[in-house]
Image (cartoon, grey):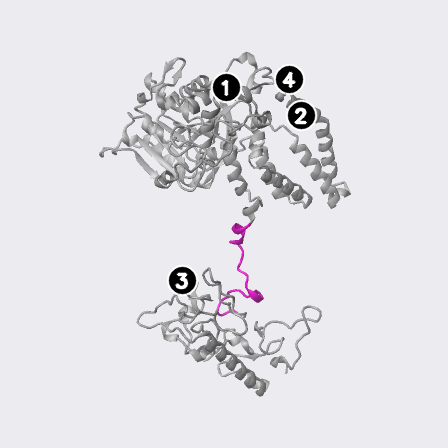
């Protein structure tokens, strides 16, 4: 009855959706003056938000129109080449250059667990440049008439066998998540029967082969509830007028309700942000929202027979690892697999498939030679990252292609059999030790979700039953939200701060030594005792007695910026900008170039230049430990009080000397120009002579000729 109520509600809202769509078009029409106002965009945004939240989303498109092969873009077209009532086989045809040899042929078996095969769009895209890719495109069960018969786990296995026979020998099959079980069964049946079309390689990624190993909360839920509970709470009949009327299914809307309830607050924030993006006419952010939710909200019904048999055999009875699983009444013998090479892949942080549950296939297939068995654990990825994302593209997909090239026989890149001594034992590669260390922890705090839609522990009421659903979308939500840069909590916090330039008091920033702007202040000290930036009274950050003063560090090399031979005595470390400003632009006299001084980056005239570092950027940072120079002791310098006292004395002497000299005497023997800052003596930020005077009404009065020696 719940499915019927859902359909009636959707039908009742159809006129309102039509009105909302017309309203959106009216207020977005550029000929309407209201479309250029905030009020008009608000009306259009509200109408679009209502229409999207009440829509039943259809099946998305793959949208893979091209790929890059040998540096050239080639067109790609997905075309069905095989079809049965519950599945189509899509071939991604590439227009290969003439004379190019054949690539390995790969069949991807997509999960039948709620979302469409387009969930593996990234999986296909990463393989297209190197392989001839096929993928299973499962049909929404409510679109299949009841007259087409039932579909259970045995039918699923038959479909995989038929597709492998259609593709022919030397096909490489990949089972992503839930299909790992039927793919393993199909391979065993074909090997046992001596079928020449048995796959050359079999790659199982994050699949629940043996859920007894390090069971997650989802696995324990299945044991606790039993198959009758799932049959009574989540199985419903397709209502009229759908083509699959009266077919028992696990409804897609029930799964989507559970998906949304897992992260309800984040979904609400996402839709609120979407509304404001439309109001602000931020088309890029709005398009990201549409792209993600068009995929996320598109769910399909599962045939009840397949769903219940999978839960019972895989999660409750554990028939496959016990050797008790059957196909059409005949026991499946996994030891019959001898010629097919086996690659198993797990994610280090995968909390949907427990630690070692996919690797169990290596133990069950005991007759596969050791040189044809590899187990790989990808570091720093969860369940979704095993078959999608940047680490999949950079590290997992190349291994899959290399595995196919190594053990294939008919494609152009086939590797001849190795004459060397075969490997002894299973090859375990990647973050295997790190994942084993997390056994018993991953998946223990999950309140709902799961590979096959096992729901939430402790359900009993009808309201709670609505939240019992499959969970691959949990990982999809966690990963894809970050990839789209949604401002959810920490997404816009510390991560974004890392891309911002450091802010200092008075806006000072590190600059080049030859730049006519203020030199950089001292950076923050290492936590937990941060040091404040340099102010007008201190030359270097305050340091505890006996601690080294700040050193000028070469940013490019990480070593000291000053040469050992250029160390200055403590008396010369006075703060230059405590008094009149000094023009730091390069002067014609080569012997008067400025240089960095000991524990600060202040410039002083009359010193020998250092050609090797004249163009390097320097900044002043507090050193936690002295950086020793070869053959020379480290000069720790005076304490903070002595440094401040020397700075004040030098500043006073500079002010007296400057006020006593005429303008013509302001030019020093080194060719440098000295001027007072517009704000008076002792200004913290020196102003270069090349800077124009400030205008009235924009931060203060323009400096008079009495304040600027160049105008006297």
| 654 lies left or right of 433 | right
Occupied quadrant, residue 466: top right
Highlighted magenta segment, given as a residue range: 493-515
Q: Which mark is residue 10?
A: 2
Foreground: 646 or 544? 544
Instruction: Report if residue 289 lies within the magenta region.
Output: no
Q: What residue is rendered at 70% in x and 30% in y?
A: 17
Residue 421 lies, in percent from the top left, at 22, 34
Q: Is residue 412 visible?
A: no
How many C-alpha atoms fall within 10 Å of the one at disc 4: few (<14), some, or many (≥20)? few
| 462 lies left or right of 411 | right
Q: Which mark is residue 558?
A: 3
From mark 1 to mark 4, how far is it between C-alphas?
28 Å
From mark 1 to mark 3, how far is it between C-alphas?
66 Å
Say which element carries label 3. loop
Q: To which residue does mark 4 refer?
A: 241
Of callouts 1 and 3, the N-terminal one: 1
């Amino acid at each position: 009855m719940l499915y019927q109520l859902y359909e009636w509600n959707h039908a009742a809202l159809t006129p309102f959706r039509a009105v909302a769509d017309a309203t959106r078009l009216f207020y977005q029409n550029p000929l309407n003056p209201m479309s250029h106002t905030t009020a008009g965009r608000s009306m259009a945004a509200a109408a679009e938000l209502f229409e999207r939240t009440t829509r039943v989303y259809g099946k998305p498109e793959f949208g893979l129109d091209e790929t890059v092969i040998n540096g050239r873009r080639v067109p790609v077209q997905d075309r069905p080449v095989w079809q049965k009532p519950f599945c189509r086989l899509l071939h991604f045809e590439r227009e290969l250059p003439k004379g190019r040899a054949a690539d390995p042929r790969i069949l991807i078996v997509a999960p039948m667990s709620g979302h469409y095969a387009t969930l593996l769009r990234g999986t296909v895209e990463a393989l297209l440049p190197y392989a001839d890719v096929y993928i299973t495109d499962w049909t929404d069960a409510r679109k299949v008439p009841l007259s087409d018969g039932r579909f259970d786990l045995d039918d699923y296995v038959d479909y995989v066998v038929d597709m492998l026979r259609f593709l022919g020998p030397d096909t490489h099959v990949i089972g992503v998540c839930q299909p790992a079980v039927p793919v393993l069964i199909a391979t065993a049946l074909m090997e046992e029967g001596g079928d020449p079309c048995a796959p050359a390689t079999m790659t199982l990624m994050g699949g629940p082969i043996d859920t007894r190993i390090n069971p997650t909360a989802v696995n324990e839920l299945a044991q606790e509830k039993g198959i009758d509970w799932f049959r009574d709470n989540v199985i419903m009949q397709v209502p009229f007028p759908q083509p699959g009327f009266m077919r028992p299914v696990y409804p897609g809307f029930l799964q989507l309700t559970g998906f949304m309830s897992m992260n309800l607050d984040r979904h609400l924030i996402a839709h609120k942000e979407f509304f404001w993006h439309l109001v602000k006419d931020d088309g890029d952010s709005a398009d990201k929202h549409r792209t993600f939710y068009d995929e996320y909200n598109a769910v399909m019904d599962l045939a009840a027979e397949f769903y219940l048999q999978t839960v019972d055999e895989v999660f409750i009875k554990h028939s496959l690892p016990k050797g008790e699983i059957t196909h059409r009444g005949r026991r499946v013998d996994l030891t019959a697999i001898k010629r097919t090479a086996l690659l198993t892949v797990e994610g280090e942080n995968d909390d949907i498939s427990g630690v070692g549950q996919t690797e169990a296939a290596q133990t069950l297939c005991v007759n596969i030679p050791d040189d044809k068995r590899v187990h790989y654990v990808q570091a720093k990825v969860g369940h979704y990252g095993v078959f999608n994302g940047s680490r999949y593209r950079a590290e997992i997909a190349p291994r899959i292609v290399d595995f196919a090239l190594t053990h294939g026989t008919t494609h152009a890149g086939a590797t001849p059999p190795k004459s060397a001594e075969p490997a002894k034992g299973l090859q375990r590669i990647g973050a295997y030790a790190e994942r084993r260390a997390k056994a018993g922890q991953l998946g223990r705090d999950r309140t709902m979700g799961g590979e096959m839609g096992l729901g939430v522990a402790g359900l009993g009421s009808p309201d709670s039953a609505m939240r019992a659903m499959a969970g691959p979308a949990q990982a999809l939500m966690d990963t894809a939200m970050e990839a789209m840069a949604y401002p959810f909590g920490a997404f816009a916090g510390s991560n974004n701060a890392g891309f911002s330039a450091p802010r200092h008091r008075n806006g000072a920033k590190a600059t080049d030594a030859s730049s006519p702007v203020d030199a950089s202040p001292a950076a923050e000290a290492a936590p937990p005792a941060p040091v404040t930036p340099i102010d007008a009274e201190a030359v270097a950050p305050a340091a505890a007695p006996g601690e080294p003063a700040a050193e000028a560090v070469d940013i490019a090399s990480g070593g000291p910026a000053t040469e050992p031979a250029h160390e200055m005595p403590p008396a010369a470390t006075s703060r230059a900008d405590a008094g009149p400003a000094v023009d730091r632009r390069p002067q014609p006299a080569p012997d008067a170039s400025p240089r960095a001084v000991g524990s600060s980056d202040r410039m002083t005239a009359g010193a020998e230049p250092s050609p090797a570092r004249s163009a390097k950027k320097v900044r002043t940072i507090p050193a936690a430990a002295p950086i020793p120079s070869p053959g020379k002791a480290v000069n720790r310098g005076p304490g903070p009080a002595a440094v401040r006292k020397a700075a004040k004395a030098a500043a006073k002497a500079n002010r007296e000397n400057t006020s006593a000299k005429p303008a013509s005497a302001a030019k020093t023997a080194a060719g440098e120009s000295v001027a007072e800052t517009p704000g008076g003596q002792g200004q913290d930020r020196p102003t270069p002579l090349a800077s124009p005077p400030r205008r009235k009404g924009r931060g203060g009065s323009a400096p008079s000729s009495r304040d600027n020696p160049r105008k006297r």
